[in-house]
Image: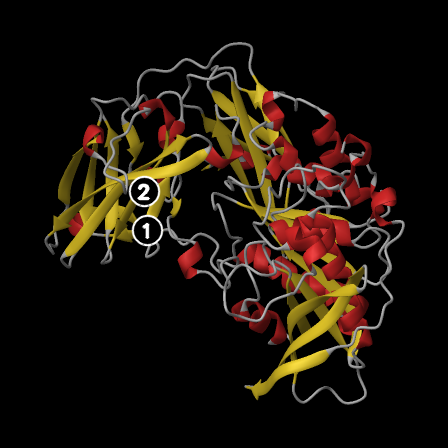
Amino acid sequence: MDSVRKILTPSAVWKDFKGDLPLKDSKVNEMTYDGISYSEVYFSGREINSSRVRVYGLYARPNPLPVNRKIGALLIMPDFCDTINLEIVNHFAKMGYAVLMVDYRGDVGENTNHTIYPSEIEYANYGKEDMFTVERTAKETCWYEWACVGKYAISYLKSRLEVDKIALLGIKQGANVGWQMLYNEDRISCFVSLFGAGWQAYKGLFKSEGTDIQMDDERYRWLGGVDAHVYAQYCNCPVLYLTATNSSGYDCERGVDTLSRLNEKIPCSFNYTPRLRQTIDKKSTDDIALFLKKHITKAGAASDRLYFPESPNVSLALGEDGRTVFAKVTVSEPDKLKSLTVYLSEGVYDPSKRNWCQMLSVKAKNTPDCKYFKLPMGGGTNFAHAFAVADYKNGVSVSSRIVIKKFEENIPSTPASMLYSSKNGVDCFTVCDEIGHSVGKIFFNENSGVELVECANGIVGVTSRYGLLSYRIVESRFNPNIRSIIKLDVYCEDYTVLNVSVVVTENGAQRDYSTTLELKGSKVWQKVQIDLASLKSAERMGIKGFEDIIAVKIEAESRFAVNNLLLI
């Protein structure tokens, strides 16, 4: 009925919420292993008519507990399609925290313990209805129910006698739920938001492109009381936002905009993981450890080493040659700075498709608080993006915002063929399989995963045991078409099956088109040639839109290195 389709603000959504009902908690399983006690628990959530949500979670704590001292606790909200992940729980429990990770996706047809929602709110079970529209009100959505689960999970942790301060960590869509949970919430001491920070209604509308959303009543209902960024102004605790630059599901530029909606008195920090898509690197993982120590441990609160400096500021200018871009970077607390890295991407609005190249330091112009960098552009475009990552001596890393510079005219270019040579170092490549080699599908505990190795005749090649992926082909000076050929030199000392793919954007999703080649083990460089027209999808279909190719992937069963990757 149209009469019940109302636009609710966060205050209207939460004004009648009752979060103080008895928990009625129970244990269904308990064990102790390697100094950690694990309890599978159920406790009651909000009441609907005469029924209550029954929340399932895994609670872990050190065993034995410290004597005469309470411990910090961490509440983890997983991605909405996931349930409890023991790897993630262990990751933080081994730091000495009490950890509660809850299932909020509910019944997904698997014969496992899960959160039980009354039939009146069956839509709270993951996938039961369109999760990104609001048919009636923001209060009658799965998002509201998931945030209610989270608020009762806070109550469960507060009921534990061993627990002192509580931190909240949200993963991807769990982070978006977390922003809602923070509505006027004073029981959380700090919040770590991984990937999710709102702006879901703007998916496919890129900030620097300037395209705005088409509004209707449903979009107003979503933006008024569901999308996470509208909740930022109600946050009462310090925030750490971490994401990957090339995520296709979470816009890294808009995510940082959410932080600007915080009250100016709320401390916040953020860091980008360059080139990765679905996980964060070791620098960001270390940021989490230091952030938690600072805000939920007594030792951290008293330490002067746990500082999180303000983000660097980056400005860009085009050099007199009409091709070289110069970056000026100002940093805070320069006496504590360990290193500074600046990345440049040319001619791509979609953050998930950008090829981030490391800029070169212009040391002759540097001052203590101002650093200069440069990089010649390949051309064929009239804009570039850049950001900086500042690493500090205490182990903290912070990023600048991503800035854009638009030029009066296109930078001149000629058709290019060299996608990579060893002169590029490890630039232009990232790892292919980050999920399969990460902790809990989120913590890729390396800073790059890509390295240079010396091979036959002293020639250097790029390698990664996780496979290689490059976005350089998306730059405008490259022009893949049905007649294009990929050529590359491959070094592998053992027999291997080489898989070469291109990633193509189709209907908003990404699909791989691949071919495999058998390579003999040899201590010489082997030449490989592949026609783009011969590549096939998993359904054995050929590429239709060669202009939609965004990346090249190279994987193998054995260790390998690559040099002289060309598109001709």
**Residue 246: where, in percent of width, then height?**
50, 40
| Contact, mark 1 vs mark 2 (Cβ under 8 Å) | yes
* Three-letter residue code for mark 2: Lys
**Residue 555: where, in percent of width, then height?**
28, 49
Which residue is under mark 1?
Answer: 467
* Three-letter residue code for mark 1: Gly
| Residue at the spot 84% in from the left edge and 52% down from the top edge | 236
Secondary-structure class at tag 2: strand
Q: Nearer the viewer, residue 222 or 564?
A: 222
The label shown at residue 553 is 2
Q: CA distance from mark 1 to mark 2?
A: 7 Å
**Local crowd at mark 1 within 10 Å, few (<14), some, or many (≥20)?**
many
Whether residue 36 is visible to the viewer of this picture, yes or no, is: no
| Residue at the spot 82% in from the left edge and 38% down from the top edge | 8
- Quadrant where the N terminus is found in the figure: top right
Left or right: residue 441 compared with residue 56: left
Displayed quadrant of residue 389: top right
Mark 1 / mark 2, whichever is N-terminal:
1
The label shown at residue 254 is none
- Quadrant where the C terminus is found in the figure: top left
In the image, farthest residue toward the top: 409
